Image (cartoon, rainbow, N blue to C red):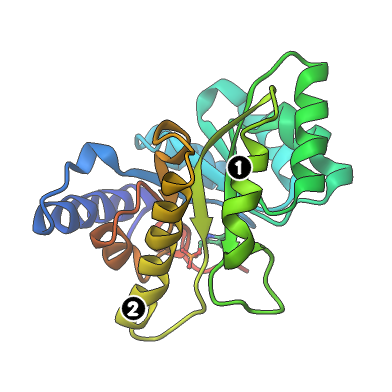
Amino acid sequence: MTTIKDNLKEIQENITTAAARCGRNPADITLVGVSKKHSVEKLQQAIHAGLSDLGENYIQEAMDKIDAIGSPAACWHFIGHLQSNKARFAVRYFDLIHTVDKIKLAREIDKQAKKIDKRQKILIQVNIAEEETKSGADAHDAVELTQAVTQFENLELQGLMCMPPYFDDPEEARPYFRHLVRIREQILAAGVTSDAMRHLSMGMSHDFAVAIQEGATLVRVGTAIFGARS
Ligand SMILES: *Cc1c(COP(=O)(O)O)cnc(C)c1O
């Protein structure tokens, strides 16, 4: 039976190989372990094996787990759909929120961050395949939303996130990753600073190598670390 430690070692090696193949520095790529629906014990095993960043999707589940583990034990990423009425919890518990997709949500996060004197790091999620069932800003609204978000005092924009449809062949996800890179270029051309566009959160268990070739700086890997979710 492979352990979380073995899985992490293999994934780190794959990240290094994928980076080397395209001339990137592996240190510029952060592995975010996606731990939704996995137990506190498994998260602790991963942290113990050296994983520094964890991603959670559901606010209540995440709060319970972070309270049990202790927030300084890891850098916490919120990667699920966020409703405005849960923004205050996300601000208290998470270092980086990947899934800001509406100005209303950005405004609420800013308001809640102000209350606790925090500058909340965020990414804008783009619905890259324009799937009706998925959250994320439409690609053609992304430039405007991004510019608007930079005006909030208590938000620190750090880049973009996307989640392409699932394909058995990870090569088929490549055009979607490229599309996110093009949107990033449009945003930079519109005057947003490269600091505010430093991250591209893209790539999951089966397609992170392709995402790294296309410029991912944050890869969100669940199953390949923790096994199947029940
Ligand atoms: C669950 C999830 C992942 C991880 O998916 P795996 O296929 O298990 O690696 C990544 N990103 C988001 C947004 C998720 O919801």
Picture quadrant where residue 140 is located: bottom right
Residue 156 locus on image (x, y percent): 58, 29
Q: Tell me the SS state at disc 1.
A: helix
Tell me, for residue 209, which label it has, or none: none
Q: Nearer the viewer, residue 139 or 221?
A: 139
Comparing 103 with 98, the one in front is: 103
Q: Which residue occupies 61% across, 77% down? A: 130
Percent coordinates x, y for residue 99 in the rendering: 64, 51
**What's the residue at 41%, 68% (across, down)?**
179
Q: Which quarter of the figure is the C terminus placed in?
A: bottom right
**Lateral position of residue 134 relative to residue 28, left or right:** right
> Between marks 1 and 2, how big is the CA–CA gap?
32 Å
Badge 1 amino acid: Gln
> Residue 95: in sight, yes or no?
yes
Q: Give the residue furthest to the top.
A: 117
> Which residue is identified by label 2?
170
**Disc 1 residue crowd, few under 14, some 14–19, many 20+, Cα 10 Å:** some
- Residue at 82% in and 46% down: 104
Q: Which residue position is annotated with label 1?
A: 147
